[in-house]
Image: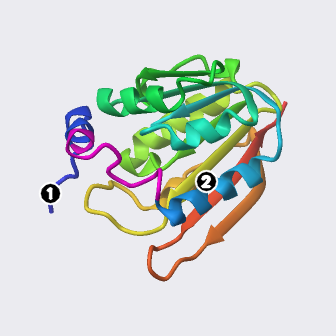
């Protein structure tokens, strides 16, 4: 069994071949998932949000409606360019090339959204990254994960594994949802709050 390619070059090739390879902007299923993410977050306002793996910025644009500032990033330059174009009229949105592996200063954010990226990390690295995020989060800050529950050859893990690896005594689990979809596989959504 071959190891999935999760390199920056792999993702850039995908975005070079299609401006929106997962059809995030137009797919009704994806739009419904984004709507549920926003409902789970509530009206806000959040002061500063961090969204790594933003792809073409569809969720980024929606988060801007409940956040004063959104810092989004992606490892694909083509995805970053598309997200910047989508959010060009939103002064509170910053989109840059980067990755969750960059280890930003998470204490600056009161909302961290990890959507559709967790299954590209090996289990040990994902746990390490999650613990680094949580350990730096400010008390009361929100962590939200949303991931597809299907199977793909380019994924290292499946959605349930990604969410089940969020184990940290500094988090209070506030919301857990599964949205089945016979055709698409459905998605899982979980929300936590950082304890003092």
Which residue extends farthest bottom?
182
Looking at the image, is mark 1 or mark 2 nearer the viewer?
A: 2
Colour scheme of this structure image? rainbow
Q: Which residues are magenta?
A: 14-26
Measure the alpha-carbon separation of dots 1 and 2. 32 Å
Asked if residue 165 lies in the magenta stretch, the reply is no
Q: Main secondary structure of the magenta part?
A: loop
x 69%, y 18%: residue: 108
Q: Is residue 74 left or right of residue 45?
A: left
Which residue extends farthest left?
2
Could you tell me which secondary element the residue under label 2 belongs to? helix
- For residue 30, above or below residue 47: below
Q: Position of residue 134 (x, y in %)?
A: 65, 33
- For residue 96, above or below residue 16: above
Q: Position of residue 1 (x, y in %)?
A: 15, 63
Could you tell me which secondary element the residue under label 1 belongs to? loop
- Please say whether residue 167 is visible from this viewpoint: no
x 37%, y 54%: residue: 22
Q: Nearer the viewer, residue 168 or 21?
A: 21
Labels 1 and 2 touching (C-beta < 8 A): no
- For residue 196, above or below residue 102: below
Q: Nearer the viewer, residue 83 or 54?
A: 83
Residue under label 2, please give it: 34
Q: Nearer the viewer, residue 183 or 167?
A: 183
- Please say whether residue 61 is visible from this viewpoint: yes
x 52%, y 66%: residue: 29
Question: Within 10 Å of the Cα at label 1, are there few (<14), some (14-19), or many (20+) other Cα atoms?
Answer: few
Quarter in which the C terminus is drawn: top right
Asked if residue 21 lies in the magenta stretch, the reply is yes
Which numbered dot is residue 2? 1
């Amino acid at each position: 069994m071959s190891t999935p390619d999760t390199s920056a070059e792999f993702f850039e090739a995908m975005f070079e071949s299609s401006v929106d390879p997962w059809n995030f902007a137009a797919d009704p299923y994806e739009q419904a998932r984004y709507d549920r993410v926003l409902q789970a977050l509530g009206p806000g306002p959040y002061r500063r949000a961090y969204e790594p793996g933003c792809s073409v910025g569809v969720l980024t644009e929606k988060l801007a409606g409940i956040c004063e500032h959104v810092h989004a990033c992606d490892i694909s330059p083509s995805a970053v360019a598309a997200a910047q174009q989508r959010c060009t009229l939103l002064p509170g949105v910053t989109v840059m090339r980067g990755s969750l592996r960059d280890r930003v200063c998470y204490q600056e954010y009161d909302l961290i959204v990890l959507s559709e990226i967790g299954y590209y990390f090996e289990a040990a690295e994902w746990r390490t990254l999650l613990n680094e995020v949580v350990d730096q989060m400010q008390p009361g800050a929100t962590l939200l994960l949303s991931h597809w529950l299907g199977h793909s050859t380019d994924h290292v893990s499946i959605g349930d594994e990604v969410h089940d690896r969020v184990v940290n005594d500094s988090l209070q689990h506030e919301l857990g949802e599964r949205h089945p979809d016979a055709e698409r596989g459905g998605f899982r959504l979980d929300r936590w709050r950082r304890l003092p």
